[in-house]
Image (cartoon, rainbow, N blue to C red):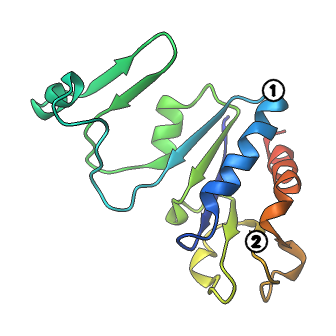
Amino acid sequence: MTAVISIVGSPDSGKTTLIEKIIPILKERGLKVAVVKHHAHGDFEFDKEGKDSWKHYNAGADVIVASSQKMALVRRSDGFDLNAVVEKYLENYDIVLTEGFNSAGKPRIVVLKPGDDISRFEIGEIIAVVCSEKVKGYEEKTLSLEDYRKLANMILGRVG
């Protein structure tokens, strides 16, 4: 079963940077890693207007763009269920990190700016809190953004 760990937190708190630092460590350990990024603003553009794939999608088709080096799928969604996406598309991965998806309730690392309220991120188990100052109630679990190796090891402990 694929392990899912969510990186959640305040806007511009360092979530993307943390994930970017953790991925190479997990890959060095031989893990197959995927990231699911939450896009809170609904629709997003996959490619540029006028490109063939854009034309196909706008004509009504779901589209896969594939080359020998990478592949991308853009399909319409009538809702989003993180568990279903992991089960259907990411079952062959060792670990899936999510950026966002607070309401999914997955084990999580919460990334905060000083003074931010952690209460809205207390949906599910908090593995660690990343902040430049100790967070009340989570003093023992608070680490700095520079502790990404320790955070990666905590994630590795979850993979088994």
Residue to which mark 2 is pinned: 129
* Disc 2 packing (10 Å; few <14; some 14–19; many ≥20): many
Residue to which mark 1 is pinned: 30
Please indicate whether residue 47 sits to the left or right of residue 120 in the image: left
* Disc 1 packing (10 Å; few <14; some 14–19; many ≥20): few
Residue sitting at x 25%, y 39%:
76
Q: In which quarter of the image is residue 119?
A: bottom right
At numbered mark 1, what does the secondary structure look like: helix, strand or loop? Answer: loop
Residue sitting at x 87%, y 49%:
153
Task: Please tell me which residue lies in front, 36 or 49.
Answer: 49
How far apart are the alpha carbons under marks 1 and 2?
Answer: 26 Å
Residue sitting at x 53%, y 38%:
86
At numbered mark 2, what does the secondary structure look like: helix, strand or loop? Answer: strand
Q: Can you say which quadrant of the picture contains the N terminus?
A: top right
Task: Please tell me which residue lies in front, 53 or 122.
Answer: 53
Q: Where is residue 125 in the image (x, y as percent from the top left)?
A: 71, 66
Q: In which quarter of the image is residue 56?
A: top left
Q: Is residue 54 above or below residue 157?
A: above
Residue type pointed to by label 1: Gly
